[in-house]
Amino acid sequence: MSEERTYETAVARLEEIIRRLDSGDAGLRETLELVREGRELVAYCASELDAVTKGLEELRLEELVARLEQGGRPPEIPDTT
């Protein structure tokens, strides 16, 4: 039975990979395999974070539209420059 990949399980596996690589006990082939797996996990985590960010942006946009439709002022947007 394989465990379903989630952001949390991917991060936990990345932590295991980092510990193994930091230990210095991994041989050359194992190191290569761990680095490959780590790169895949990092890409997966980045895509998950991107999806969550887009979802949050959509929620904020929906909230702004609802406020504007009700005649309310939009929230102040902080200047990040």
Image: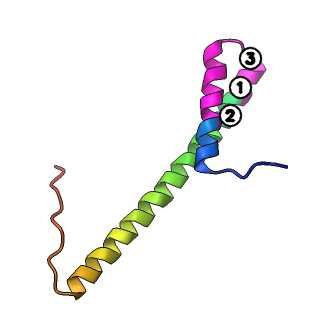
66 versus 36 height, above or below: below
Helix, strand or loop at mark 3: helix
- State the image quarter where residue 18 is shown: top right
The residue that mark 3 highlights is 28
Residue 36 - label = 2
Q: Point out residue 21 in the picture as x, y percentages from the top left corner.
A: 64, 20
**Residue nearer the viewer, 8 or 26:** 8
Tell me whether circle 3 and circle 1 mark residues in contact (CB < 8 Å).
Answer: yes
Q: Which residues are magenta?
A: 13-33
> Seen in the image, is 24 located left or right of residue 43?
right
Give yes or no for residue 50 being in the magenta stretch.
Answer: no
Helix, strand or loop at mark 2: helix
Q: Residue at x 58, y 48 (%)?
A: 7
Q: Residue at x 71, y 25 (%)?
A: 32
Give yes or no for residue 16 being in the magenta stretch.
Answer: yes
Q: Point out residue 16 in the picture as x, y percentages from the top left corner.
A: 65, 29
